[in-house]
Image (cartoon, grey):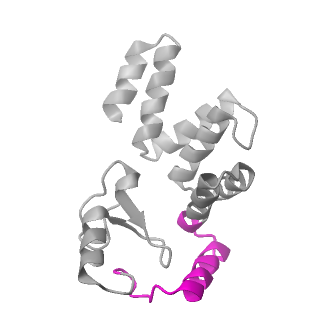
């Protein structure tokens, strides 16, 4: 995991406790997000880009055109939240090919639940392993659960210790 680019503290393992900035695709911690909102600033705390509607959207589209995996994964997350699993799958696939571990984790979940794709245990495990190797703690935990279900409690414990 990366550090917050503003306070330089390590990010929380739970990515829901961080905020991705659409303008520069940086992930900042909740503390910096709170301080930013409390200050009343109207620009990005990292790149100082004005957080206005059309300009922000154009900048995000430019980041996607430049194959920024974080921006592509972010679009996939938005599509996933809205229930458009097929387009989310396409975004996650592209971002995973560019090396984004969150995209690998999300692909594994789509394969697990059969959302936008057919359920496929082999592909699910492949993407969980890729995400776990990249340092995704939830993917590592899920690998441990799978090992336990397959009758390998020792391997499961190792995954959980790493997670």
Residue 141 image-quadrant placement: top left
90 magenta-colored: no
Question: Is 93 placed left or right of 1 in the picture?
Answer: right
Along the horizontal axis of the image, is 20 left or right of 8?
right
Instruction: State the quadrant of the C terminus.
Output: top left
Tell me which residue sits at (55%, 84%) in the image: 53
- In percent of width and height, residue 153 lies at 40, 14
The answer to whether residue 136 is above or below residue 62 is above
Work out whether 8 lies above or below 83: below
Which residues lie in the magenta part? 45-71
> x, y percentage for residue 81?
59, 54
Lateral position of residue 16 relative to residue 71, left or right: left
Residue 161 image position (x, y, % from top left): 31, 29
State the residue at coordinates (59%, 32%). Answer: 125
Q: Quadrant of the N terminus?
A: bottom left
Q: Residue at x 57, y 46 (%)?
A: 106
- Seen from the viewer's position, the closer of residues 112 and 154 is 112
**Residue 39 in the image: above or below residue 29:** below
The residue located at (28%, 74%) in the rendering is 6
Counting the numbered discs, the total is: 0
Whether the magenta-drawn stretch holds residue 57 is answered as: yes
x and y percent of residue 2 in the render?
36, 60
């Amino acid at each position: 995991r990366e550090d917050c680019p503003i306070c330089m503290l390590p990010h929380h393992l739970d990515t829901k406790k961080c905020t991705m900035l659409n303008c520069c695709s940086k992930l900042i911690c909740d503390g910096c997000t709170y301080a930013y909102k409390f200050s009343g600033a109207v620009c990005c705390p990292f790149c100082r880009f004005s957080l206005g509607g059309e300009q922000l959207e154009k900048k995000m589209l430019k980041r996607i055109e430049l194959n920024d995996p974080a921006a592509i994964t972010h679009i996939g997350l938005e599509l996933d939240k809205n229930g458009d699993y097929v387009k989310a799958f396409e975004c996650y696939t592209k971002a995973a090919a560019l090396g984004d571990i969150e995209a690998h984790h999300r692909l594994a979940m789509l394969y697990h639940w059969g959302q936008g794709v057919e359920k496929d245990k082999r592909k699910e495990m492949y993407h969980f392993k890729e995400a776990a190797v990249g340092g995704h703690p939830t993917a590592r935990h899920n690998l441990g659960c799978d090992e336990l279900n397959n009758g390998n409690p020792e391997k499961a414990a190792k995954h959980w210790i790493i997670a």
